[in-house]
């Protein structure tokens, strides 16, 4: 696949992108109370613990909401494309693209599964496709 901008990484998000490179979708879990959180951040919003580990997500989820952007045109995205909020089965929500389906066919509540897409320059991104869609 052609290029995509590499995600910006910080000390807080490094584990997430390391996992994605290994085709694992990781979710941060509070060591104090077990609450899952995403996007990654240093402190638990529920109990303020700074201790955490991770669990591996199943990769299954549903489309919570989505848009089909038209402007501005970006060189990394062939039009049309879908930017979506996906609710993972584990309860956290992430921003991603829906692939493997015509954008007009995407719907709220659609069951989707993660698909790790490898782009030029070693960029790997966790995108989602409808359950059962061809690779
Ligand atoms: Zn906590």
Image (spheres, rainbow, N blue to C red):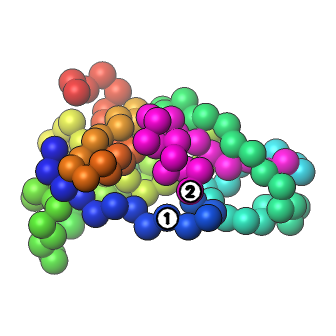
Magenta-tinted stretch: 14-31
Of the numbered discs 1 and 2, the one sitting upstream in the chain is 1
Residue 109 visible at all: no
Q: Which mark is residue 9?
A: 1
In the depicted structure, whether residue 38 falls above or below residue 69:
above
Q: CA distance from mark 1 to mark 2?
A: 6 Å
Assess disc 2: are there few (<14), some (14-19) or many (≥20) residues with their C-alpha within 10 Å of its C-alpha: few
Answer whether residue 8 is visible to the viewer in this image.
yes
Q: Is residue 80 above or below residue 63?
A: below
Tell me the quadrant of the picture where the C terminus can be found: top left
Residue for badge 2:
14
Q: Is 108 part of what is drawn in magenta? A: no
Magenta-span inclusion, residue 30: yes
Q: Position of residue 67 (x, y in %)?
A: 28, 61
Residue 58 falls in image quadrant: top right
Would the CB of label 2 be found within 8 Å of ligand 1? no
Foreground residue among 6 and 106: 6
The tag on residue 94 is none
Residue 122 image offset from top left, x and y in percent: 30, 48
Q: Quadrant of the N terminus?
A: top left
């Amino acid at each position: 696949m052609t290029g995509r901008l590499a995600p910006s990484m910080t000390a807080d998000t490094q584990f997430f992108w390391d996992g994605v490179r290994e085709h694992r979708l990781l979710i941060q879990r509070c060591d104090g109370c077990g609450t899952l959180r995403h996007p990654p951040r240093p402190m638990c919003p529920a109990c303020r613990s700074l201790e955490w580990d991770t669990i591996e997500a199943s990769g299954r989820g549903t489309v919570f909401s989505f848009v089909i952007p038209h402007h501005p045109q970006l060189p990394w995205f062939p039009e049309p494309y879908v930017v979506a909020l996906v609710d993972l089965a584990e309860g956290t929500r992430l921003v991603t693209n829906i692939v493997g389906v015509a954008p007009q066919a995407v719907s709220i509540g659609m069951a989707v599964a993660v698909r790790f897409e490898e782009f030029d320059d070693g960029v790997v991104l966790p995108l989602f496709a409808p359950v059962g869609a061809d690779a």
